Amino acid sequence: MSGAQAPDALRSLVESRIRDVQDFPTPGILFKDIGPLLADPEAFAAIVADGARRHTGRVDFVAGIEARGFIFGAGLAHAMGVGFIPVRKAGKLPGPTVEVSYDLEYGQARIAVQEGAVAPGSRIVVVDDVLATGGTAAAACALLELVGAEIVGLDVVMELAALGGRSALVGREVYSLTVA
């Protein structure tokens, strides 16, 4: 399932604040730098307002994927007056955690949430900066469902369409502010 498209003015604003950096972090890579976007309070506020408009009354929590998903997710949670759940790399959260493994291009990774952070039946929107191959986003959704959450959708600032991340999220509502 696809989500709605961002309004043209917001999409243009976001695109104008993303900087292309050639050959970073390695030769041949075109890195999409969101630093200028984060430095612009008008753009950041517009992103948060757009998410709040779409999700207020629909969710109990916002879950942000480490690390840049924390930035956008915490802002959105604050704007809506709901709690924020950090989805972190394994070993980064204190106390008992629930973890899942997922495949990367070259190996595996684990992500975690704190045990008891999510009440069963909680409605959650998952937030991240970029949707690339979709592995981390799919794992975050699966992890939150494992602890009893209902995933309402996945919001990203930018989707790298050529990497096919939506194919890892079939059946989920995915909302992307811009597609590169």
Image: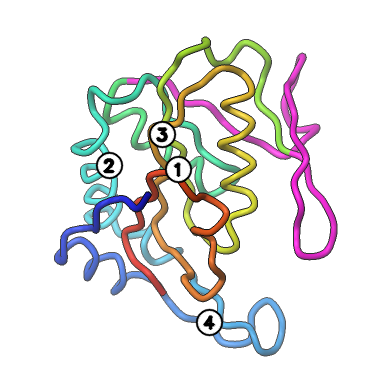
Position of residue 134 in the picture relative to residue 97 (left or right): left
Q: Residue at x 57, y 54 (%)?
A: 168
Callout 1–callout 3 Cβ contact below 8 Å: yes
**3D distance between C-alphas at marks 2 and 1:** 10 Å
**Rendered view: 49 above or below 87:** below
Are the residues tagged 4 and 2 within 8 Å (C-beta)? no
Image point (34%, 24%), residue name: 59
> Which residue position holds label 2?
51
Asked whether disc 3 touches disc 2, contact meaning CB atoms under 8 Å apart, the reply is: yes
> How dense is the environment of label 4, judged by Cα within 10 Å: few (below 14), some, or many (20 and up)?
few
Q: Residue at x 57, y 31 (%)?
A: 86
Q: Which mark is residue 21?
A: 4
Q: Which residues are magenta?
A: 82-110
Residue 147: x and y, percent? 62, 19
First of labels 4, 3 by sequence position: 4
Q: Which residue is mark 1?
A: 127
- The reply to whether discs 1 and 4 touch (Cβ–Cβ < 8 Å) is no
First along the sequence among labels 2 and 1: 2
Identify the image quadrant of residue 124: top left
For label 3, the residue is 125
